[in-house]
């Protein structure tokens, strides 16, 4: 499932409001630190505790997943990832994403992968791996508990258009579509054009969306 959103910032914020169940005991949203500020605000408004995973030099500026104890993973409802990272630029290798997916399967939390910088990298022969790509390689062909967010703001330098998309687990995105008012989730000519394009050009495997398809979604 691919769902146009009104820019990554609004999409990430609204997504957490739809996914977090504040009736469960002590819900937590885990995020890298430093982080894009919307992660923390989204967690707080959803009634969840923001939990910060420090991105230290010793670990290549990646948040340490294995430093989190089992009790906190059990409370986690959403894990934010960002690769390439903002502001560190650190790229999460496939083995890292595999570990995150294993923990998600074990503890039942949703991974929200902020991939709005995914097409900004120095080596054309080595693009950063994406969460859906790795999930598919692990046999998770329905992308269960996985949602990625992409934006035209960085890759096309058009932040004012407020256009992006979320892709991944169809069940979660259907719930997101139903729980969040359409005017907040997406609006404007750009997102409506993206919605029309996706309706006429269904993407059978969003984990394999090509660069040309990314460009057409925002055309």
Image: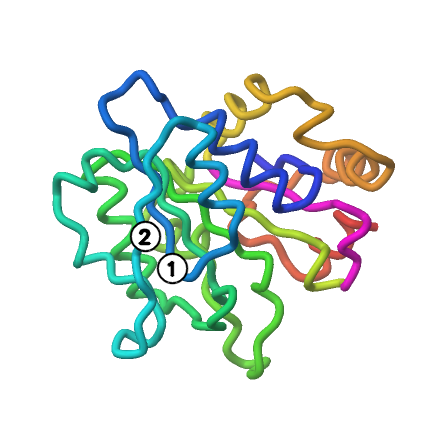
Q: Residue beneath label 2, please?
A: 52
Q: Residue beneath label 1, please?
A: 33
Q: Residue furthest right?
A: 189
Residue 97 magenta: no
Q: Is residue 19 above or below residue 91?
A: above
Q: Is residue 136 above or below residue 92?
A: above
- Decide if residue 132 is on the left or right side of residue 56: right
| Image location of residue 135, percent across then percent down | 37, 50
Q: CA distance from mark 2 to mark 1?
A: 6 Å
- Decide if residue 94 is on the left or right side of residue 41: left
| Image location of residue 74, percent across then percent down | 19, 35
Start and end of the magenta stretch? 157-168
Circles 2 and 1: CB distance less than 8 Å? Answer: yes
What residue is drawn where x is 24% and y is 57%? 65
- Does label 2 or label 1 sit earlier along the sequence? 1
Residue 197 is drawn in which quadrant?
Answer: top right
Q: Secondary structure at mark 1?
A: strand
């Amino acid at each position: 499932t691919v769902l146009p959103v009104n820019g990554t910032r609004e999409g990430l914020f609204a997504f957490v409001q739809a996914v977090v169940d504040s009736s469960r005991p002590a819900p937590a949203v885990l995020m890298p630190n430093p982080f894009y500020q919307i992660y923390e605000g989204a967690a707080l408004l959803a009634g969840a505790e923001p939990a910060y995973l420090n991105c230290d030099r010793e670990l290549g500026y990646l948040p340490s997943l294995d430093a989190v104890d089992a009790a906190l993973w059990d409370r986690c409802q959403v894990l934010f990832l960002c690769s390439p990272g903002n502001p560190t630029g650190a790229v999460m290798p496939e083995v890292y994403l595999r570990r995150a997916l294993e923990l998600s399967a074990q503890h039942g939390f949703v991974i929200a992968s902020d991939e709005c910088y995914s097409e900004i990298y120095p080596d054309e022969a080595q693009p950063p791996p994406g969460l859906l790509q790795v999930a598919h390689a692990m046999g998770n062909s329905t992308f269960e508990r996985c949602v990625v967010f992409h934006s035209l703001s960085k890759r096309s330098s058009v932040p004012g258009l407020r256009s992006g998309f979320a892709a991944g687990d169809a069940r979660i995105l259907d719930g997101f579509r139903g729980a969040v008012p359409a005017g907040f989730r997406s609006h404007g000519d750009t997102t409506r054009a993206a919605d029309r394009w996706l309706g006429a050009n269904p993407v059978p495997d969003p984990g394999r969306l090509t660069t040309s398809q990314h460009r057409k979604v925002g055309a």
